[in-house]
Structure formats: structure tokens, C-alpha cells
Amino acid sequence: MQPYVHKNENGTEFQVWQFSEPRMEAKALFALLGRNGDTEESLLELIRIAPQDQAVLRDCAADCPGLAAHIGRALQYRLRVEEEFRALCRRRDRGHCVAA
């Protein structure tokens, strides 16, 4: 897979299709619970890709085979972040301390 390396406005190179560990993102979002009105559901909405957006991404993948694997990985990544976030919420609901 092509790495798609780009530079930001500061000249720092980054890979467009590189993702952190799903658990890391889930923990960062979990830390927002109760702050600024963030609820479990509002954060899940942030994590999820809306069905209509998923359809557009799948169409894009079909039209551009070079991006298909990247788009598939991105969709799977969002699902894994949601799974990790839900697991943290379940632990909290059972009274376990969850370090964010």
C-alpha cells in the first residue's frame, strides 16, 4: 500500500492513512465523558461514521481501487474504536476504575 506521505503547514511529514491504536483514541474520548456536556451517546456519535458517509466511502473505494484498502482499514478502525470505548463504559458501569 502506498503510504500517502504529506506535509502539514509547519512542514512536518505525516502519513494520511496512519492510525493510532484504537484503545488510545477510545481512552482519550472516554476522558471527555461528563465534560462540556459530552455524554456516552454524543461521543459514540463522534466515533461512528454515519451510514450515508459509509456508503459514499464505499462508492469511492469502488471507483478508486488504489484507495479501497485504506478506506476499508479506516472503516474497521472506527468500529474498533467504538468497541474499545464501549468496553471502557461497561467497566465504569460495573464500578471498576478506568484510567483514562
Image: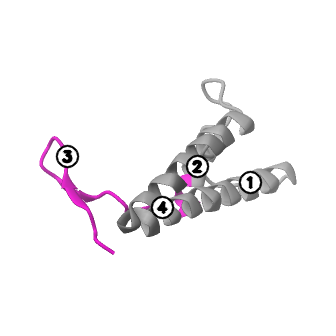
Q: Which residue is mark 1?
A: 86
Q: CA distance from mark 2 to mark 1?
A: 21 Å
Q: Amino acid at mark 4?
A: Ala
Q: Which residue is mark 3?
A: 8
Q: Is residue 65 left or right of residue 97?
A: left
What percent of the width, then of the height, locates residue 91? Answer: 79, 57
Residue located at (60% from left, 46% from top): 49
Q: Earlier in the sequence, mark 4 or mark 2?
A: 2
Q: Earlier in the sequence, mark 3 or mark 2?
A: 3
Disc number lying in front (2 or 1): 2
CB atoms of marks 2 and 1 within 8 Å? no
Q: Nearer the viewer, residue 89 or 10?
A: 10
| Mark 1 burial class by Cα count in 10 Å: few <14, some 14-19, many 20+ | some
Decide whether residue 20 is among the magenta residues: yes
Residue located at (45% from left, 65% from top): 68
Q: Amino acid at mark 1?
A: Arg
Q: Which mark is residue 62?
A: 4
Q: Earlier in the sequence, mark 4 or mark 1?
A: 4
Q: Provide the secondary structure element on which disc 2 rests.
A: helix
> Quadrant of residue 46 in the image?
top right
> Quadrant of residue 84 in the image?
bottom right
The correct choice, above or below, for 98 with respect to 2 in the image is: above
Q: Amino acid at mark 3?
A: Asn
Residue found at the very far front of the displayed protein: 63
Residue found at the very far right of the displayed protein: 94
Q: Quadrant of the N terminus?
A: bottom left
Disc number lying in front (3 or 2): 2
Coloring basis for residues: one colour
CB atoms of marks 1 and 3 within 8 Å? no
